[in-house]
Amino acid sequence: MRYLLIAALIVLAAGMARAEPRVVVLPFDAMVDSVYIFMGEKQSVIDYRSSLQQMITSELLKYTEIWVVEYADLIEYIKTKNIKPDLWNDPKLASRIAADLEADYAIIGTYGEFTREIRVDGRVVVAASGDVPQGNTVTSVVGIWDDLPTAAIQVANQIVPIVTASGRLRPTSKGVLFPEGDLSAYDPVRTSPESSARLVVWVNAPAPIISTSTSDSFKRCDRIDVMNIPAEKMRTQSCKVAVIKAGKIDLRIEHRGYLPYVETLDLAAGKAYRLEVDLKKVETLPR
């Protein structure tokens, strides 16, 4: 029993430590309406959305260089979140879904039937930003609907080098540092050492834990730091301040249910700063 437990822990650790970029394939949208006119007659467009999505997912699963979100896990997520968009081909929506599923990239796209060809166009969305960088597009053109598996293979073959070239780009919490003038403006009686700097930290979470490499102690912000701040922001965010030794410091902000924020700050002596941090929520699926 002990050996089985050890083996299970090894497998779990290996899965958590995966270095491969993680990809999720969303449904592809039809380029044209569900009904169109051909030679004066109404023709229905066959809905290949789910089939194409599953084919591309299956092809990507054959590659060991990437880690693919299983189709069943995505469907469970969509049902749990009750996601019913008019169009799936939306980078911002794809970014949110990918981030919730801890994926680095989302694959979105369209398919369409034309006079002599079936065309599939895909885009590789960076989950951390919601962007589709130049070159993150793929295309496949086949003759008939029976060739759709071939199109899926061609699309997958183009996706893999794009993803592996960029590597892992996991969603992270973000922060922006703003200069706030001189420290003396906040310390008129000059009680702070000349070699120190003042740092105010605004966090979009109620009870963050802030730690630094210099073991600084943060307290609730002074009145001057929260003047003219809307009441709604005060209820949903946290403001903390500390006078710390100037120079480079490693700062880490943690909060239960959020991805941590980690940064190295370089603060000048005698100056004041404001750091605004946007912690990203961690989504978990019920099992």
Image (cartoon, helix red, strand yellow):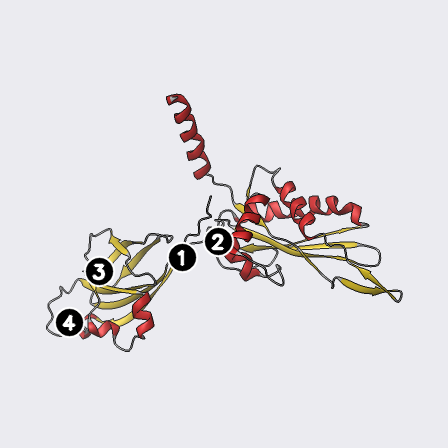
Task: State which mark lies toward you, 4 or 2.
Answer: 2
- Whether residue 165 is visible, yes or no, is no
Residue 128 locus on image (x, y percent): 48, 56
Q: Is residue 40 left or right of residue 14?
A: right
- Residue position marked by numbered label 2 in the rendering: 99
User: Which of the marked residues, 4 or 2, is nearer the chain's N terminus?
Assistant: 2
Residue at position x 70%, y 43% in the image:
153
Q: Quadrant of residue 91?
A: bottom right
In the drawing, does residue 208 fall left or right of residue 55?
A: left
Label 4 or label 1, whichever comes before in sequence order: 4
Q: Which mark is residue 187?
A: 4
Q: In the drawing, what numbered circle is on residue 280?
A: 1
Q: Quadrant of the N terminus?
A: top left
Say what secondary structure mark 4 lies in: loop
C-alpha distance separating marks 3 and 2? 35 Å
Residues at circles 4 and 2 in contact by the CB criterion of under 8 Å = no
Q: Left or right of 234: which side holds 191?
A: left
